Amino acid sequence: MGIHKAVFPSLLLTGLLALACANPAWANLYKCKDANNRTHYQDSPCQQLKAERLPGNLSRLFGEEEARGFFWKATAGQGTLFLLGSLHFGSQSLYPLPALVTDAFSASDVLVVEADIDGIHNADIAQTLRTKGRYEDKPGLEARVKPMTWQKTMELANTLGMTEEQLRPLKPWFASLALTAQALKQAGYTADLGIDLNFLKQAEGKKPVMELESVDGQASLLEGLSGAEQEEMLLQTVQELTRGVEYFKTLIDVWKRGDADAMDLITRQSFGSGQLGGELYKILFEDRNLMMANRLKDMAADGRTYFVVVGAAHMGGEKGILALLEEKGFNITQP
């Protein structure tokens, strides 16, 4: 039996975000205060007495006044970008969204997403992933990764109710996404309640929709990874999903607080400090962030107001979309 068709419409998007942010790494993340009482995050203990070491449940540390939403406004000349960091999967606990977000959407001329997963027929997406994500010949996945990688993959698959027959035909990158999607489903999260799909549904017949990437382009990106990079991606996924579902809850906590610094640190730490992890991070994030920032700058030049929904992990950091837009002359504020 193959992977359930309901997984396919946003399997790729869900997998990319969940994989990149999978490692909570709270044992190495610290909330600190500088001399001016400003909050920052670092991966080593703070030197000030005001430091707090972050536990798994972040929401207990913050009062309502610090819950700002993963939402920014960027202006340059006559152009305006409303930037909402998306979770490509979700639950009812995310809704309703803050009024300032929904009001900004109503006031915008165009909706911009990474990929229009609502505008493409499900069968077309499924065919794209089947074509790019499966081996055309034998041997399959088991013979193309290290024995230990395959063993760990199957140990996780068994806990998720997946079989060897389901995984063996898949390339490592596609197996990573399939495992992530199944883990999300098992944890009670669904792509139908993802932030981007929510706004795509609202835009139907009301606003034009523009893509920064495409499902086919994202699949081609992963297909273009080297064999070693794909196996690293699979092994990383297996290691993090084996920890259980707590990191999904933690990710939503960070998102609700609108904390781009913490999201960035979580994302970077999940790739480790090795060369292969660094190369994978550059391909999946730094290169794509620059491409998206350049496209957004070009869009905003026409003076219209754009409501932009991209994965939350793309927003923060020195090479995140917010910093790149600021370098390009945009004024960035968090309402």
Image (cartoon, grey):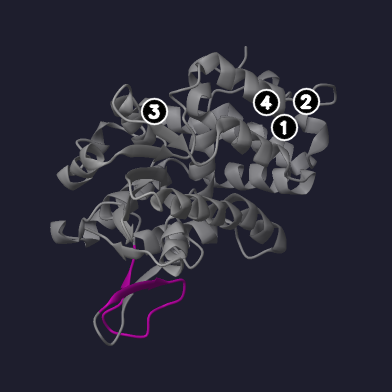
- The residues tagged by marks 4 and 3 sit, at their Cα atoms, a distance apart of 21 Å
> Is there a contact, CB below 8 Å, between mark 4 and mark 2?
no
Q: Is residue 46 above or below residue 260?
A: below
> Is there a contact, CB below 8 Å, between mark 2 and mark 1?
yes
**Mark 3: few, some, or many residues within 10 Å (few <14, many ≥20)?**
many
Counting every numbered tag in the picture gives: 4
Depth order, front residue of 55/128: 128
Depth order, front residue of 297/123: 297
Question: In this figure, which residue is indicated by the disc labeled 4?
Answer: 167
Q: Is residue 323 above or below residue 87?
A: below
Q: Amino acid at mark 4?
A: Leu
Give the SS element for disc 2.
loop
- The residues tagged by marks 4 and 2 sit, at their Cα atoms, a distance apart of 11 Å
Is 90 placed left or right of 125 in the picture? left
Q: Is residue 49 above or below residue 102?
A: below
Question: In this figure, which residue is indicated by the disc labeled 1?
Answer: 171
**Residue drawn at (45%, 51%) of the image:** 296
**Residue drawn at (25%, 54%) of the image:** 59
Asked if the stretch drawn in magenta spans residue 92, the answer is no
Q: Which residues are magenta?
A: 38-54
Q: What is the x, y in percent for residue 222?
A: 66, 40
